[in-house]
Image (cartoon, grey):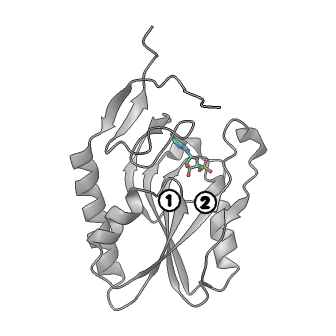
Amino acid sequence: MNRKPRLRPVKTFISAPRIRRRVDALAAQISRDYAGRQPLLVGVLKGCLLFLPDLLRGLKVPCTVDLMAVSSYRGDKSSGAVRLVLDLRESPAGRDVILVEDIVDTGLTLDYLKKSLAARGVRSLRVCALLDKPSCRRAPVEADYIGFSIPDRFVVGYGMDHDEHYRGLPYIGTLQKERS
Ligand code: IMP
C-alpha cells in the first residue's frame, strides 16, 4: 500500500553555502593531516549520503571508500542497542581509517563503530562528523573533525532524515509544526 506521510515544513538552520564552506575546510584539514598517506574513508549509511561525496570531492590525498550501516534505535533510545546491518566489503586491517558520520548525538553509534573497527586491527582511526550535539552524549566518544557543534535540536536534510524523508535537502533544517 502507498503510505503518504504528512510532511512538515522545514526551517533553514545551516544553509547550503555554509555547509559547502565548512565541508571544504574539513577536506583541506584532512588533506593536510593525511599527506603522504592513503586513508580509507568509511561512510556510515544512510546519514552520510550527501556529506561523504562532498568531503571526498574536496580531498587532495588518494583514498579508498567503503560503507557501513547500523540499525537505528530511534524511538527506543533508552535501549541504546546498536546493530550492524551492513559491513565493510574489504578488511580495514592496517589502514588509516576515517569514519564519516552525519551526526554524533548520544555517541552510542559511534562508540559501537569505533570498537568494531579497532578490533579489526586498523592502523589508525579518526572520526569526521558533520554535526555534533555534545549536550546529548551518553557514551564517552568524540569526533576528531567536526563540521558544526549544535544544541540539542532535531535536524533534517543534507543526508539526515525524519522517518526516511528530507534526506535530499541541500541544507540542514529543523521541522516546523504542520500547517493545518
Ligand atoms: P547517536 O545517538 O549518536 O548514536 O546517533 C545515531 C544516529 O542517529 C546518527 O548517526 C543519526 O543518523 C541519527 N540522529 C541523531 N540525531 C539526529 C537528528 O537530529 N536528526 C536526524 N538524525 C539524527
Task: Give the residue at x 31% y 45%.
Answer: 170
Q: Is residue 97 left or right of residue 72?
A: left
Residue situated in front as seen by the camera: 134 or 163 = 163
Q: Which mark is residue 69?
A: none
Residue at image mark 2 = 110
Amino acid identity at mark 1 = Glu
Q: Is mark 2 within 8 Å of ligand 1?
A: yes
Which quadrant of the structure image shows residue 12? top left
Q: Is residue 177 left or right of residue 59?
A: right
Which quadrant of the structure image shows residue 123? bottom right
Q: Earlier in the sequence, mark 1 or mark 2?
A: 1
Dot 1 and dot 2 residues touching (CB under 8 Å): yes
Mark 1 crowdedness (10 Å alpha carbons): few <14, some 14-19, many ≥20: many
Dot in front, 1 or 2:
1
- Residue 108 in view: yes
Q: Is residue 118 above or below residue 180?
A: below
Q: Is mark 1 within 8 Å of ligand 1?
A: yes
In terms of secondary structure, where does tag 1 sit?
A: strand
Counting from the top left corner in percent of width and height, residue 1 is at: 65, 32
Tell me the quadrant of the picture where the C terminus can be found.
top left
Amino acid identity at mark 2 = Leu
Counting from the top left corner in percent of width and height, residue 61 is at: 31, 83
Task: Give the residue at x 41% y 31%.
Answer: 174
Residue situated in front as seen by the camera: 34 or 82 = 82
Q: Is residue 62 above or below residue 69?
A: below
Measure how far apart labels 1 and 2 are at the Cα level. 8 Å
Which quadrant of the structure image shows residue 166? top left
Residue at image mark 1 = 101
Q: Is residue 164 left or right of residue 177?
A: right
